Amino acid sequence: QVQLVESGGGLVQPGGSLRLSCAASGSIFGLNAMHWYRQAPGKQRELVASITRDGSTYYAYPAKGRFTISRGNAKNTVYLQMNSLKPEDTAVYYCNAQAGWNNYWGQGTQVTVSS
């Protein structure tokens, strides 16, 4: 069984930065892509950024120019560098891994942007 664990969330002032990490308990067979999602209270879970097996990246509009998704040295790790954070970035951030027909989710890490 594969388990993803997010870390790096916390409280940060507007304009500040955080780096989220996602680590899998083991190698993921047939990994196609990894994603960061977020969900704010009362809102739908939304995609923030993606990175495919070949390293291609995608960013949702709110993240463009501010967030960077990257792979770690280990193939089962992914990071989300978040800069110029805004209050509207406040949410629980989830790591997702797609491998064939399987989807793996972490438990989420809280990011709160507030002065």
Image (cartoon, helix red, strand yellow):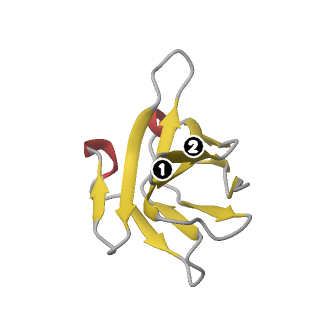
Query: Which x, y percent locates residue 61?
Result: 25, 44
Residue 62's quadrant in the figure? top left
Decide which of 48, 102 is in the foreground and name it: 102
**Residue 64, placed above or below residue 41:** below
Q: Earlier in the sequence, mark 2 or mark 1?
A: 1
Answer yes or no: do the residues labelled 2 and 1 have beta carbons within 8 Å? Answer: yes
**How crowded is the residue under tag 1: few (<14 C-alpha within 10 Å), some, or many (20+)?**
many
- Left or right for 109, reference 71: right
**Amino acid identity at mark 2:** Tyr
Instruction: Tell me if residue 10 can be seen.
Output: yes
Decide which of 39, 77 is in the foreground and name it: 77
**Amino acid identity at mark 1:** Trp
Q: Quadrant of the C terminus?
A: top right
Q: Quadrant of the N terminus?
A: bottom right
Say which residue appears at 42% left-offset and 55% top-offset: 84
| Residue located beneath label 1 in the image | 36
Q: Which label sits on residue 93?
A: 2
**Residue 104, placed above or below residue 69:** above
Say which residue appears at 28% left-offset and 57% top-offset: 58
Question: Circle 1 — which element?
Answer: strand
Residue 64's quadrant in the figure? bottom left
